[in-house]
Image: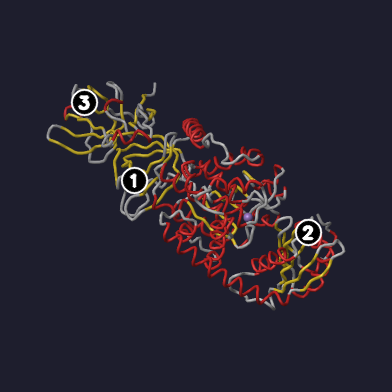
Amino acid sequence: MTEKVYRLGPGCTVDDVAEGNIYLGKVQGFATFGMFVQLNDKTKGLLHKSNIRTERKEHDDILVLINQIRPNGNLDLREINLPEGGYTTELVAKRLVISRLSDLPEKLGRNITVEAEVVQIKQTSGPTIFTVCDDSGTEGAAAFTEAGVRSYPEVNLGDIVRIYGESNKRNNQIQIEVSGMTVLKGAEADAVRAKINAALDARSEPPEIEPLIDSGILRALWPEMRKLAKIVRRAVLTQQPIILRHHADADGICAAVSVETAVLQFIRETGGDPDMDNFLFRRSPSKAPFYEIEDVTRDLDMLLKDNARFGQKFPLILLMDNGSTEEDMPSYKMTEVYGLNVVVADHHHPDETIDKYLLAHVNPYHVGGDFGVTAGMLGTEIARLIFPEVEDKILHFPAVAGVADRSEAPELQDYLALIEGKYTIDDCRDMALALDYEQYWLRFMDGREIVKDILNISGNPGRHERLVTLLVSEANAALEDQITTMMPHVKEQQLFSGAKLFLADVEMFAHRFTFPPPGKSSGEVHDLLCKKYADDPIVTLGLGPDFAVIRSRGVQMNIPQMVRSMRDEMPGAGISGGGHLVVGSIKFVEGMRSEVISRMIEKISEFSVQ
Ligand code: MN
């Protein structure tokens, strides 16, 4: 019969050993009456010299039998000699009392064991900090081997681990001082993971609230908005970073800043480190109303470096006021290669082909609505579903967004009614213009704190007032100058459909590389013409060297479809573009400019007037 030899696992104490059993130990030191043998880093016993069989030196492995466990916990040992291969060894696992992370504040200074998922590994110049998450919450665990040296290199991001240590407090935050950590495998890990997942699922569930206004479209979109909000909440709860990409206009900014406000407060609420804001949440404006290759490339570059350097998880990509169209496809193919999760809240006319790349896609067109329910409206409602306490702060965002995007949806009136007495429609218009103007100079920067002042959520209403007044007067002066310059050169054509077509050259007869950019300049010209010809259907083309901006009123346009058919019909023109049904843009090669413009005019005259 082969003897059984036990090996005392990490965390085990005298409570886990039994008299008469044989254990594998290590010689720890000598005394006049015998030697001390260590069974693990917590447990040792005395091998009296009368029970020593072999000459030993420090650190030698040794087999010992437990003669007696004394009432004070001291162990009396006897050396056993077994031939090599004459025994099997078995690991003694600690009889575990698993603490939940949320219970650690009550167990300060005590030894605890937790089972959790590793959601981040950060090497500091001192200890290695493992951020771990269980079914109750998220905490940091500090393990130290040597300054700046990675502890437990066998532990990877996403592993389920059992941590032995002491519950402590550091900088007012709970931290586990790790004394041992093992990676759980197989069924044991699966059970812990299932428990964490079930709890996370419940905690990610958005609150049971209703949309701010009574809207059939919002009601129909509600389940998808809840789904998106749940994905965002789950990302926060699991320390998954979030990259929020949004169209760099006032509507897109309102959408993104409402979600930014909610996410940052939710991170704090759930015990996230506020200094980690920039790691856990990043808002990036995109110049185009879609996720450009340039954007996805920047994002990938950064996230892959963060992953390599800081053990950061791959982020959730949230696209707002962009992401719905075929133009996003090349970027989605990139996100797919890296297995990134992407969610979209947009009001551009959606192409079904992109849905297979998305975990959630909120779009009013899916439920019979249109772009009049703007991204800023969707964003504000989603922000409430992420963290409802932000509601008061961002209540005016949907109105600012709706005014900015010239929404004619009844929803805008309802959102304006919500803020009656606090902001007028002119206040909203001013904030929208100030956002557009300031974002022009911010370019790719998010301008987080400036934007807070413009939207009056920085807690400094005086500064908000002065800043918006200044920006609006600067923007208006620039707009007026641009329009005065452009208008004498605008050419008019009468289309067979009965619509008036206006051609405004934003290349030769407009200021370039300053505010207002071509799109905004064309929009202003269009608005002026709409006022002048209040009863006529109107299409305005802002013509650049290799692009055109299209605005229309009272014509049943479908710009994405028009651009697609022109692309098929004119293979040598290098056509791309799209946008909303009645507002959009087209790009082409400069050498085909006149051909493209005349074909476009033909196409536009085929759309019937309303
Ligand atoms: Mn928009």
The residue singled out by tag 2 in the image is: 564
Residue 263 seen in this snapshot: yes
Q: What element carries label 1?
A: strand
Q: What element carries label 3?
A: loop
| Residues at marks 1 and 3, CA–CA distance in whole angstroms | 29 Å
As drawn, the residue found furthest toward the left would be 32
| Residues at marks 3 and 2, CA–CA distance in whole angstroms | 82 Å
Q: Position of residue 228 (x, y in %)?
A: 58, 42
Front: mark 1 or 2: 2
Tell me if mark 3 has few (under 14), some (14-19) or many (20+) residues whose alpha carbon lies within 10 angstroms of its own: some
Residue 491: name its quadrant: bottom right
Ligand 1 neighbours mark 1 (CB distance < 8 Å): no
Question: In this orientation, which residue lies closer to the viewer: 180 or 313?
Answer: 313
| Residues at marks 1 and 2, CA–CA distance in whole angstroms | 58 Å
Residue 314 seen in this snapshot: no
| Residue 143: mark | 1
Tell me if mark 1 has few (under 14), some (14-19) or many (20+) residues whose alpha carbon lies within 10 angstroms of its own: many
| Residue 73: mark | 3
Three-letter code, disc 3: Gly
Identify the residue shown where x is 67% and y is 57%: 330
Determine the quadrant in which ligand 1 lies.
Answer: bottom right
325 to the left or right of 94: right
Answer with mark 3 or mark 2, whichever residue precedes in sequence.
3
